[in-house]
Image: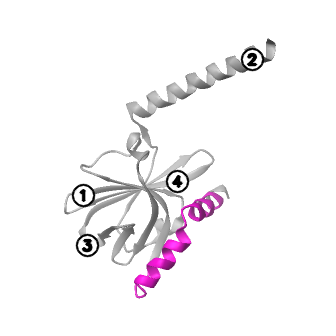
Amino acid sequence: MLDKFYRVLTNLIYLVPLAVRRFKAKEPDSQILAAGATKARRLAEDSGIQYEAGWITARRGTLILTRDKLVCGPWQIPLSTISHATLLRTKVPLAKALVMKVSTTEGQHYQFGLRYDPAWENQTALKLSVTDGKIGYSKFSVAWRVVLAIALVIWLIWLVVQWLG
């Protein structure tokens, strides 16, 4: 239930319906198989899926899958150039999520963070290997979480001191 709520909310925040309408206006003959709000990264080399600093500056937008390409803003990835694609199903707090990893024959590597949507699993145009798993943590991500936890503890101690004093 929360999966659908989060997907609808995120799609509204990222203006996915508007992006889909614009895409259909530009390419009326293209059939959209799946579309959703995404955080997207283009990488110089293939890397594991993990929480890391690169996601902070990741492109936010709409990922659209048609019968012949993936489109995310100005990125147009023809399905014929995709050498490998993986869809990781994972859990995030209170919901499920997806991360799609795509490698092309031209040496480009992409990662797309998506809200859970069965349309991505059920489509047949893009050959995906679907796996269940967890997202790893980079050293930066672990350090950032430790800093935030320490800041939270200090703030709570300050609140208690203010309340007692």
Mark 1 crowd level (few <14, some 14–19, many ≥20, 10 Å Cα): some
Look at mark 3 in the image and give the residue it sits on. 80
Look at mark 1 in the image and give the residue it sits on. 108
- Is residue 6 within the magenta segment? yes
Provide the residue span drawn in magenta: 4-31
The span from disc 4 to disc 1 (Cα, nearest Å) is 23 Å
Q: Is residue 11 above or below residue 134?
A: below
- Hey, what amino acid is under mark 3? Ser
- Hey, what amino acid is under mark 2? Val
Between 25 and 66, the one nearer to me in the picture: 25
Proximity of marks 1 and 3: CB atoms separated by less than 8 Å: no
Residue for point 49% across, 72% down: 19
The span from disc 4 to disc 2 (Cα, nearest Å) is 37 Å
Q: Nearer the viewer, mark 1 or mark 3?
A: 1
Q: Earlier in the sequence, mark 2 or mark 1?
A: 1
Which of the numbered marks, if any, corresponds to residue 97? 4
| 51 left or right of 75 in image | right
- Hey, what amino acid is under mark 4? Ala
The span from disc 4 to disc 3 (Cα, nearest Å) is 26 Å
Q: Earlier in the sequence, mark 4 or mark 2?
A: 4
Q: Secondary structure at mark 4?
A: strand
Q: Earlier in the sequence, mark 1 or mark 3?
A: 3
Residue for point 56% across, 22% down: 150
Q: Secondary structure at mark 2?
A: helix
